[in-house]
Amino acid sequence: MSAAVKTATDVSSGDAELSVSGSGFLYRYSDAGHSMHDVADETGDCGVRAVTIATGRDYDVVRAEFTGLLEARRGRKAKNPESVTTGLKRPTVGTILGSEWAYKSHYGSSPMPRFVHSTLPAGQTFVVVLGRHYCPVINGVIHDLFDPSGPDAIIYGYFHRVDAR
């Protein structure tokens, strides 16, 4: 394959170099293939990107699933409407992930856990729920546009595969 042509898999995982974050995670830049698709440069699509990376599915397919679900809900009045471009609520992300994923909440824990390497069990795939951000972590490696981990980043919970507990 020529260097100029990259697949979504190359862009989302294989080509980017690993670096070590200050919080003990490995970090790999990944846009989930977002840059290969005909979408505007969006900063609010972290839910779509996180689900795409964690499940290994295509960005366009995941985005279409979220869009379809949100359009089906449009008839209801929403106090804080959600969208694939401005942010998704945790239950919506859980619906798209499906029943093979479970949510473990840390909300209300005292103290709230911080996004450092020792917080997550080793060797699993997660969609971590932070304040206004979703972040995929696969086998201890953060795959995201930036490294959101650190002692000031609070984990509100995370999705994990049910069969990988």
Image (spheres, rainbow, N blue to C red):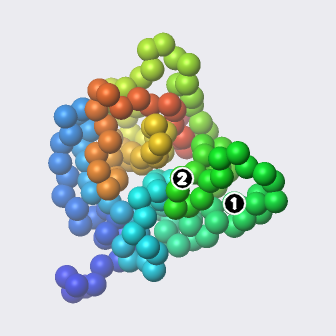
Residue 17, placed above or below residue 114: below
Q: Position of residue 55 (x, y in %)?
A: 50, 57
Q: CA distance from mark 2 to mark 1?
A: 11 Å
Q: Secondary structure at mark 1?
A: helix
* Horizontal side, residue 161 vs residue 77: left or right: left
Q: Position of residue 138 (x, y in %)?
A: 38, 47
* Residue 108: numbered disc: none
- How many numbered marks have been drawn onto this rendered protein structure? 2
Is residue 89 at least partly visible in the picture? Answer: yes
Q: Position of residue 81 (x, y in %)?
A: 66, 52
Q: Earlier in the sequence, mark 2 or mark 1?
A: 1
- Using the rendered view, name the quadrant where residue 113 is placed: top left
Residue 26, placed above or below residue 58: above
Disc 2 packing (10 Å; few <14; some 14–19; many ≥20) = some
Foreground residue among 109 and 74: 74
Q: Position of residue 117 (x, y in %)?
A: 31, 31
Residue lying farthest right? 75
Q: Give the residue at x 23% y 66%.
A: 15
Q: Give the residue at x 61% y 39%.
A: 102
- Using the rendered view, name the quadrant where residue 21 is placed: top left
What residue sits right under mark 1 in the picture? 70
What residue sits right under mark 2 in the picture? 87
Q: Give the residue at x 72% y 65%.
A: 71
Foreground residue among 84 and 119: 84
Q: Give the residue at x 44% y 31%.
A: 155
**Identity, as a three-letter code, of the amino acid under mark 1:** Leu
Disc 1 packing (10 Å; few <14; some 14–19; many ≥20) = some
